[in-house]
Amino acid sequence: MAYDLILQAETGFMSMNGDADTQPTKMPVALIDILAAHHLKEGLLLALIDRMTSNQGSCVEVSLYDAALCSLANQASNYLMTGVIPKRMGSLHPNIAPYGEIFTTKDSVQFTIAIGSDLHFRKLLAILNLSKLQDDDRFSTNQSRVKNREELGAYIAEKLNNLESKVLFETLRSEKIPYGEIKSLDKVFSDRNAQELIREDQLTNIIGKRMTSIAFKWKK
């Protein structure tokens, strides 16, 4: 018997999750269960493809523990390459800045941005009338931005606090700058795209609702 909570604790996920000043935190969904299911699905598909040519069946096994470790991705690589143990840092990315900082607009809408390239950074600075910062040694490269992310975040936050979300988000979209409004589930499910993934089940006299577990679209 295995519990997702215990796997998140034993495989490093909880130690990295949460803000720097909080206790280790579990993901609010059964993350390891979902990851293991996807790994198992890949193994089953490969077994089916093999059977088409070999005409032989296969046994596919996936453990929750292995699935969790194999999904540590860049956090595992960072540790294995440098020996540095990841610390809790909220939504921030250990290798990219600004990435994951939480900002608030003038009309109190919270959002985050993912500045994955120097081009994104230059465009963001131009929008905020901060272009002078691109020549500042503290922020001229991604490495320097990671090192000085708190100072950079303060400059950006000051500008964003004076902008209305509607105009700002329209500008970010037009400039193809990745951003995401931090939405509660009621706002998430008010979107037509999310509604299309809802399925209904008849449970005695009650209509049950759930999310489909199939996210891909099939075409021939």
Image (cartoon, rainbow, N blue to C red):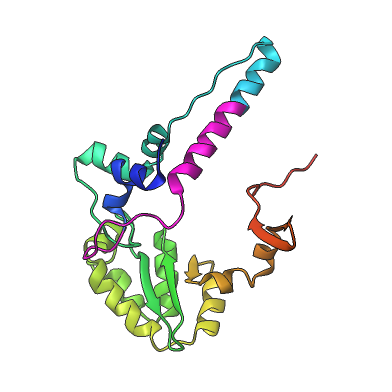
Residue at (40% x, 89% y) in the render? 162
For the N terminus, the image quarter is top left
Above-or-below relation of 45 to 114: above
**Which of the 4 quarters of the picture holds residue 176?**
bottom right
For the C terminus, the image quarter is top right
**Which of the 4 quarters of the picture holds residue 156?**
bottom left
**Residue found at the very far front of the displayed protein:** 204
Residue 39, percent from left and from top: 51, 34
Above-or-below relation of 47 to 11: above
**Nearest the eye: 21 or 89:** 21
Residue 151, percent from left and from top: 23, 73
**Which of the 4 quarters of the picture holds residue 129?**
bottom left
Residue 118, percent from left and from top: 39, 61
Residue at (57% x, 78% y) in the render? 170
Q: Is residue 40 magenta?
A: yes
Q: Which residues are magenta?
A: 18-44
